Image (tube, helix red, strand yellow):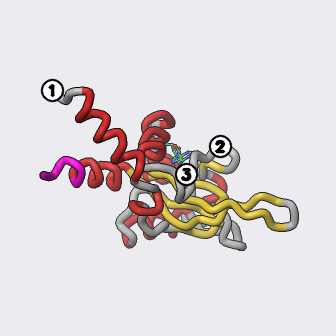
Amino acid sequence: YAGKHTKNLIAEKIREIKVNDIKSVPVVVREDASVYDAIVTLFVEDVGTLFVVHEDGSLAGVISRKDLLKIAIGNADIRQIPVSVIMTRMPNLVTCNPEESAYDAARKIVVHQVDALPVVKTEEINGKVKYKVIGRITKTIITKLFVELGTI
Ligand code: ADP
């Protein structure tokens, strides 16, 4: 049984670790990439979620394994369909920033029931807010952190 003191120590720890300390490299595709290309990228890069970026590199959307499976099991010509047609797009994306805690990111993953969050830096260009993709936080990263914290 974890007493109050022990629990506070764990809470303190996961709150002091920043997204920036645990993020990994984002895997992105352009919004005009085909669904076929996205599936290939998923295998080549060995990830479950892809981030979709505009021409200027800013965040446009997110594509999950199941988003790709859903379109692939239909009769659609996946070489002709751009990922932008099926992605989940702004402003419906759940993101995190590098200064947020590991706890906040993990909580977002749980609350919004997603596998991955883009780590973004907010930039204002010509009065328009853009999100520069600088990393990713996934369930795997959080699980690894959990194991690390539990290792004596
Ligand atoms: P899967 O669909 O493979 O189970 P997810 O649970 O991560 O993977 O995705 C569920 C749905 O949520 C998908 O339609 C996906 O596009 C969307 N999604 C995934 N990640 C995010 C995110 N960070 N913000 C908003 N929507 C997301």
Q: Would you say residue 48 sits in the magenta stretch?
A: no
- Element assignment for label 3: loop
Amino acid type of disc 1? Tyr
User: Is residue 142 toward the left or the right of residue 34 in the image?
Assistant: left
Q: Are marks 1 and 3 in contact (CB under 8 Å)?
A: no
Q: Quadrant of residue 106?
A: top left
Q: Are marks 3 and 2 in contact (CB under 8 Å)?
A: no
Q: Is mark 2 within 8 Å of ligand 1?
A: yes
**Most distant residue in the right direction:** 126
Report the predominant secondary structure element of the magenta stretch. helix
Foreground disc of the pair 3, 2: 3
User: Is residue 74 toward the left or the right of residue 2 in the image?
Assistant: right
Amino acid type of disc 3? Cys
Q: Which stretch is magenta? A: 148-152
Q: Which residue is mark 3?
A: 96
User: Is residue 40 toward the left or the right of residue 57 in the image?
Assistant: left
Q: Which residue is mark 1?
A: 1
Foreground disc of the pair 2, 1: 1
Residue at the image point whose x is 46% and y is 56% from the top:
19
Q: Which residue is mark 2?
A: 92
Residue 4 percent across, percent down from the top left: 26, 27
Q: Would you say residue 151 sits in the magenta stretch?
A: yes
Residue 88 percent across, percent down from the top left: 61, 48
User: Which mark sits nearer the N-terminus, 1 or 3?
Assistant: 1
Residue 114 percent across, percent down from the top left: 46, 43
Location of the N terminus by quadrant is top left
Amino acid type of disc 2? Asn
